[in-house]
Image: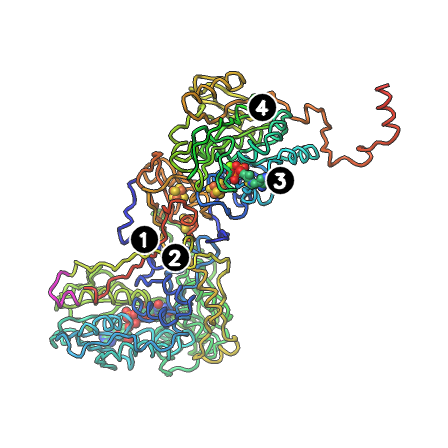
Amino acid sequence: MTFVRPSFRHPQQPTNALGYVRKDYEGLISTLCAGCGHDSISNAIIQACFEIPVEPHKVVKMSGIGCSSKTPAYFLDRSHGFNSVHGRMPSIATGANMANRDLIYLGVSGDGDTASIGMGQFIHALRRDLNLTYVVMNNGCYGLTKGQDSATADRGSRTKKGAPNPFESIDLCEMAIQLGAGFVARGFSGDKQQLVPLLKAALLHRGIALIDVISPCVTFNNSSGSTKSYQYVRDHIEATGTFDFIPLQQEIVVQYEEGATQAVTMHDGSIIQLHKNVGGVDVTSRRRALDLLEAEREQGRLLTGILFLDPESEDTHAILNTTLTPLNQLTQAELCPGAAALEQINARFR
Amino acid sequence: MKPTKIEHPEYFHRVIDCQYACPAHTQVPEYIRLITAGRYDDAYMINWISNVFPGILGRICDRPCEPACRRGRVEKEPVAICRLKRVAADFKESIKARLPVPPKTKNGRRIALIGGGPASLTVARDLLPLGYQVDLFDDQSAAGGFVRTQVPSFRLPQEVLDEEVNYILDMGVNCHFNHYVGSLKEMLGRGYDAIFIGTGAPRGRDLPELPGRKEGDRFIHVGIYWLAAVLYRHIDRIGKRVLVIGGGNTAMDCCRTARRLGGDKVKVVVRSPRAEMKASPWEIEDALHEDIPIHDKLSPLEFVIKDGRLAGMLFERVEGQVDDQGRRRLTATGEAPVFLPCDEVLLAIGQQNAFPWIEKDIGIEFGRNGLPVLHEITHQSTLPQVFFGGDAAFGPRNVITAVAQGHQAAISIHLFCEGRDLRQRPHPRVNLTGQKMGFHDWIYDSHVTDDERQLVPTVEKVRSLKDRLLEVELGFDADRGHRESRRCLNCDVQTIFIDRTCIECDACADICPVTCINFIVGGDEDDLRSRLQIPADNREQALYVSPPLPTGRVMVKDENVCLHCGLCAERCPTASWEMSKFTYHEAQAEDV
Ligand SMILES: Cc1cc2nc3c(=O)[nH]c(=O)nc-3n(C[C@H](O)[C@H](O)[C@H](O)COP(=O)(O)OP(=O)(O)OC[C@H]3O[C@@H](n4cnc5c(N)ncnc54)[C@H](O)[C@@H]3O)c2cc1C
Ligand SMILES: Cc1ncc(C[n+]2csc(CCOP(=O)(O)OP(=O)(O)O)c2C)c(N)n1
Ligand code: SF4
Ligand code: SF4
Ligand code: SF4
Ligand SMILES: [Mg+2]
């Protein structure tokens, strides 16, 4: 087994607008199982950050526990990072985000980490619309602890050597839409053509952006009875429609192509242009999005792509009306203005 | 694009850049791995089988393999393939017992070799084990051809030359030295079954029309004759100020030899711009290191004679220009002529073929440049039993080309003597050996080191300039040799894709450090090349395309900068990539 990746890269590897090459966004060599969907998502993250482009040192990557939560070690080596305890990534992300609003927050979690032990944390991050890209690497099982069914496993689905799952499954996307998330999407690790632009749009979205990425666990949950295997997902996938993500820098040249059914302008002026949406649905309508998810589920199909997008959403800082200067840059005098200021504040409540 | 036919022996051969570029198709990565393993004898034998003169070539080969080396495309410099060959030769123990022994009973066929250079010696080596009687004729006192008479000892010590020439002569060549063949007709009359002509390109170009040439004759020498005279010790000194005219390797040997015979102001003067000089970059570097400046874009006008002695030369300044046909031409700039003072001049402006001893009426046709008309692959002349090889065949090249042509001529001669069709060439012997050892372990060392090309130690300049017999390069020691050998990327360990089992999980494409692997919708070659994650613009390198996969896409691998690191195979959950060592053994006479 090789534990070091050769340091050579393609001599013609492109440079992005910030002067970085893709290698500047890479991490250590993965220790996950060969063929794990999570590795593909890591690569999509690298590609998205390279393409946007973001400055590596402006990104904070955070995670909980699980194979999925290990992946931040495998991308963005030059970014900030914090590997929290199981299911607690949202709290850590909230703290960091409150302290420094100027960074780009990328949270990586698993279906176990999010839908079981971390559920309480997850829903509050959604409610508060934390400015965070929340990626769930969803394999329908607890990969790290050897493949037990997770709360996103479909009823009746079977992991390798497991019995059919008797419980109802949680649809994280539906939940996120209900709880007010402004950007909700679903991807598949085996389709980078869709996943990379999803990640790019999510990273630039202000407020919480949830991407539930179906990511087959080749070792424990890629068998014929599983609804999260490469084969099953490929056979049942349905996209809300193809879309183009047009970053702000290119806005001037945007042309509304024939057949484009909807264009949504994001906070920073970037544009998402959707084509051939399923049933011509309006992705900015919460109710229609929920309807569509339910309808596709009834048909046994897995809907992917951008599911819901609220271009007007506000993040926690806006909701709380915090200062524009990141808290960690305020001085002692500003943070602790002294007894006189306290007296003034108290006076207002008298 | 249709799925790639990897069964075609040339497909993977092309991936092994060095072996493919080597005229004799030496199994380079194989011998380099053997050096890493410290198996110098085995490494030497791999070489000896293909290129016949590993110790010699490990010093003086023109090394077409090195500019082709894959490592040079992903890093600053290629693997020092040539110097590693020398490592094998320097550190081997005795390999005599492993050399082929010609059979006691001969096959009854007699062959004459005219000229005793590397081409003829290769023919001898290939045919002796098959039972041929081989008679060799050379006008010099020992075999080796130009390698003996031209290549200076400070680049190639005589012992090394003797050792490898003798391996062949000791197999039972009947040598006729100091024997100038003055008539091919007479040779034909001796009843040989076939005659091989390996007489090289023995005539040095002169500047007979240049003013002052006759008057200055004592001080003006044709480089190749002068080098031979130095070797035979007819000449042992030269004037202090020397001009060497010419920009090829002969010029480099002349100037460096002149430095060792008392020339302290030696200059090379060349017509073409410096960047277009024919000499190998490393030879130019060596000359510069020995304080020999190169004056370019100067075309000789006149030898200036004063008081019966050569005083110097006049040159016209020229410039490279592109004419209406798009050809590069050197034209005079019109500036005043440049005078360079000197005591002696060495002319190294090229060699020519000359066959005054071949009668015009015996059926051997000559074409352009006085070269014989030959079949390009079989080397057969218009007189069926006469074959040419080496510099005599297609004009002056180098030793490794002479060797490769010797192998081809030997095949032809053998086919000819057997009465078979010369154009039905024997096929290369190829083989694929899986490299899987454990779950994720390989038989070969797949690790790619970051080490840069090792520098070769040399003798101190003050010492080496005093002694023309002292070899300048000392060669790698075992440790440096090992470091260098590990730089090889094992391009013979091939990646084989098994489309039937691939689940298109992307793991291989994700892990590949150099972004070789792509899963995309099919198309024609140009289209595919342009749509890869990193466009494949090196057309010398193949695309490996699979049949359509379940999603309708195809796997396209750009072979260009694959590091053969095996990570794709390690990361594949379904073992759909195999690492297999591809052995390509170029056919020789014994394979007929
Ligand atoms: C100065 C110089 C330096 C060189 N350095 C290199 C180098 O570093 N690396 C490299 O790869 N190549 C080098 N070469 C080229 C290389 O020497 C030749 O390409 C190579 O030797 C050709 O081999 P051959 O067998 O065709 O003929 P040759 O080596 O030329 O041998 C031909 C032999 O035939 C003899 N002969 C000719 N006519 C007759 C006749 N009628 N009867 C009997 N004998 C005859 C000649 O005297 C000679 O001995 C160099 C050449 C020169 C001139
Ligand atoms: C507090 C706590 N409880 C339980 C565990 C055991 N544990 C480790 S990983 C894991 C499940 C991870 O599943 P998921 O988030 O889906 O990640 P995956 O490995 O599938 O990517 C569990 C239960 C733990 N590490 N900490
Ligand atoms: S156990 Fe499953 S989730 Fe974990 S690395 Fe292996 S394949 Fe991926
Ligand atoms: S061996 Fe495989 S992973 Fe390594 S460089 Fe070649 S294609 Fe890429
Ligand atoms: S890693 Fe194996 S199964 Fe996955 S895409 Fe590559 S060849 Fe196919
Ligand atoms: Mg999981």
- Do discs 2 and 4 share a chain? no
Q: Secondary structure at mark 1?
A: helix
Q: Is the CB–ligand 2 distance for label 4 below 8 Å?
A: no
From the viewer's perspective, is residue A181 above or below residue B540?
above
- Do discs 3 and 1 share a chain? no
Q: Nearer the viewer, mark 2 or mark 4?
A: 2
Q: Looking at this view, is B579 or B282 the one in front?
A: B579
* Chain identity of mark 2: B
Q: CA distance from mark 4 to mark 3?
A: 26 Å
Residue, disc 3? A85
Please state the extent of the stretch shown in magenta in the rendering: B414-421
Residue B520 location, x and y as percent? 38, 37
- Do discs 4 and 1 share a chain? no
* Chain identity of mark 1: B
Q: Quadrant of residue B351?
A: bottom left
Label 3 Cα crowd, 10 Å radius (few <14 / some 14-19 / many 20+): some
Q: Which mark is residue A182?
A: 4
- Is B588 covered by the magenta stretch? no
Q: Is residue B79 left or right of residue B100?
A: right
